Image (cartoon, helix red, strand yellow):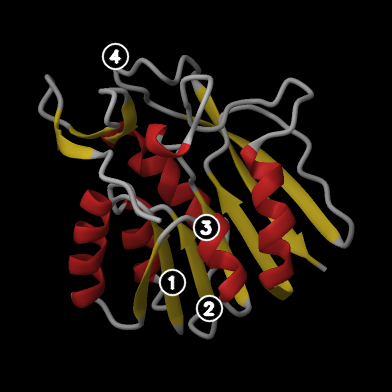
Amino acid sequence: MTTEGNVHGLDELGQEVLWSSRGQQVMMQWEKKYMELCVDALAIQPSDRVLEIGFGLAYSASRIQTFRPRSHTIIECDRETLQRARLFAAAHTGVEIVAGTWQQQLPTLNQFDCVFFDDYPLPELESGEFPTREGGDGGRRSRWHDFLDVALKHCANGARVSGYLAREMDLQRSGCCVAVSEVLVGVSANCNYFPHKTALVPVITVE
């Protein structure tokens, strides 16, 4: 399944932004440094098979490519974003684009050594509450939990998982070691989805 929800452009400050079909800010340029820190935490090696969930504004994908992994698989479900992802793949070696949601496509894939997770619940695929990217869980189950239930089945021994995490949540899983570090982020004044001055960099290592 793919959607046509996202719109890519510039905000009133002239900075890159991704909007949802409802006009909600999905990703903004201020996130670039934070995304890069999350990717760096994966300690990607040239022999690694990397899985990325969500192409967004290509910040994480571009950082992943600086490590020249053996393979780089990107799952993306938005049609506008897919067009940009395919152009990115054409310009880089070893990048494969998988169209669809991770819920549909990940079970069809093989093993990975590094996984980067930045999922946004598009309105077209959601019902009920207005969608947001992950914050803290407040004791509730989150999309991170749902993702790990599937992703860990596709992680090789020693694999590392990281991604967007606004607030602390319990990511512990049997057979895994979890480390979380807090980093300062320079959030744009016009950002309406991230009210914090810090974000978290999680690393879940499969032992």
Cβ atoms under marks 1 and 2 closer than 8 Å: yes
> Which residue bears the numbered disc 3?
102
Q: Relative to 7, is 12 above or below?
A: above
Cβ atoms under marks 2 and 4 closer than 8 Å: no
Q: How far apart in space, not on screen, are marks 1 and 2 (Cα)?
A: 8 Å
Judged from the image, the secondary structure of the residue bearing numbered disc 3 is helix
Query: How many discs mark residues in the rendered view?
Result: 4
> Which residue bears the numbered disc 1?
73
**Residue 176 in which image quadrant:** bottom right
Residue for point 83% across, 68% down: 207
Judged from the image, the secondary structure of the residue bearing numbered disc 1 is strand
Q: How far apart in space, not on screen, are marks 4 and 1 (Cα)?
A: 33 Å
Mark 1 vs mark 3: which is more N-terminal? Answer: 1
Amino acid type indicated by mark 4: Ala
Residue for point 27% across, 15% down: 190
Crowding around mark 2 (Cα neighbors within 10 Å: few <14, some 14 to 19, many 20+) is many
**Residue 42 in which image quadrant:** bottom right
The N terminus: image quadrant? bottom left
Q: How far apart in space, not on screen, are marks 2 and 3 (Cα)?
A: 17 Å
Describe residue 54's horizontal placement relative to residue 11 as left or right: right
Mark 4 vs mark 1: which is more N-terminal? Answer: 1
Judged from the image, the secondary structure of the residue bearing numbered disc 2 is strand
Q: How far apart in space, not on screen, are marks 1 and 3 (Cα)?
A: 11 Å
